[in-house]
Structures are given as structure tokens and as C-alpha cells.
Amino acid sequence: MSPTQVVVIVIVVAVIAALVALAVVANRRRALKQRFGPEYDRVVAEQDSRGAAERELRERERRHAELELTPLSPESRARYAAAWEEIQVRFVDSPAETVGDADELVGHLIAERGYPTGDFSDQIAHLSVEHARTLTHYRDAHEIRQRNERGEAGTEDLRQALVHYRALFADLLGEDPVGQQPPEQRHPDHEHDATSR
């Protein structure tokens, strides 16, 4: 074999290896995008690079795998559903208090499922692995609740918070969460349906 042939073979092998590496990276990226949905884009926007964002998401998956998540018993599911119905009924008379109660109920549900309930950003990171599609709702609800505590949220804001809490609540219960579309794309009747369940 001539030196030229050896060089050509080495170059071909290097090109094939590079193509395989690119395919592996592309498959990993596609898997992360599929698993994390809109959360993938959010983390990419927050990080210095796509690589750093993907390392963060893989780290979330690793930490999530260490959790001991438990499904709800039928009794717990019924208890949570009844508690949510009560919150919706009370909203008419005391919306400000009810949003706080909704946040507390969602927190209890998160804890019972086995997720950490301490720091909000840590909680979001853990939830993002299985509930990424409803995290925007949870973030929005959390932000409105904080505004409510400062006396800056109106009744319509509070109603929106309840709709947002309901999306994560339903997702955690294993129901089809209402509000998978961004809030600006939903029809107002669908939002009413979400608070009237």
C-alpha cells in the first residue's frame, strides 16, 4: 500500500468517525428537545452555549433518576380532585386567598409524588424532566402569586393564576392537562373550562 493510499484511508476513517460523532450529538439533541419541549429552548436561552444547556438538562435527568417518585393512590387522587373543586368554589368569594391555597395544594401534590419542595428553581428543574410542557404555567402562576402577595395582582390575574396552577395540577394527577397551548393562543372558553373542573 502506497503512502498516498494510507493517507486517503486515514482521511476516510476520520471523516466517517466525525460523521458518526455528529450523528450521536444530533440524536442526543433531538432526544433532549423531545423530552424537555419548551424547557429545552428556555435553558438554551439562559445558558452561555447550547452545549452548556444540554449538560444542564442531562444533569437534571441524572438528578431526577435519583428521586423515588410514587404514583398516587386512587384515594389520594380523589382527595386532591375534591380539594381542587373546593378551591374553585371558594375563588368567587376570596380570589386572593384561593390562589395561595392553590399554590399550597400543588405543593402538597408535588411532595406526595416524591419531588423536592424547597427552592422553587430546584423544584422546577426536577419537574422539568417529566412535566416540562406545563412548567410555563407553573412559573406564571408562581409569579402571579408573588405579585398577589405584594398587592399587585387584580382579579383577572388571580383567575389566570388558577388556570395556570390547574395545568400542572392535572399533569401531576396524570390527567390530560388543560392549557397545553400558550395562554395567548387559548380560547377564553377553554380557560373557563379549566377553572370549572
Image: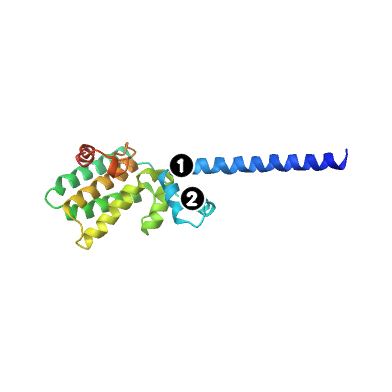
Under mark 2, the amino acid is Leu
Whether the residues at callouts 1 and 2 have beta carbons within 8 Å, the answer is yes
Residue 40 pos. (x, y %): 45, 47
Quadrant holding the C terminus: top left
* Residue 135 visible, this angle: yes
Furthest residue to the right?
A: 1
The label number, if any, that marks residue 57 in the structure image: 2
Furthest residue to the bottom?
A: 150
Furthest residue to the front?
A: 4
Q: Is residue 68 left or right of residue 196?
A: right
* Residue displayed at 22% across by 58% down: 148
The label number, if any, that marks residue 35 in the structure image: 1
Question: Relative to the observer, which residue lies in front, 180 or 111?
Answer: 180
Q: Earlier in the sequence, mark 1 or mark 2?
A: 1
* Residue displayed at 37% across by 43% down: 133
Q: Name the colouring of the figure.
A: rainbow
Question: Relative to the observer, which residue lies in front, 52 or 131?
Answer: 52
Question: Relative to the observer, which residue lies in front, 85 or 176?
Answer: 176
Under mark 1, the amino acid is Arg
Mark 2 residue element: helix
Measure the C-alpha gap from mark 1 to mark 2.
10 Å
The residue carrying pointer 1 sits among few (fewer than 14), some (14 to 19) or many (20 or more) residues within 10 Å by Cα, namely some
Instruction: Please tell me whether residue 138 is drawn above or below residue 190 in the rendered image.
Output: below
* Residue displayed at 53% across by 44% down: 29
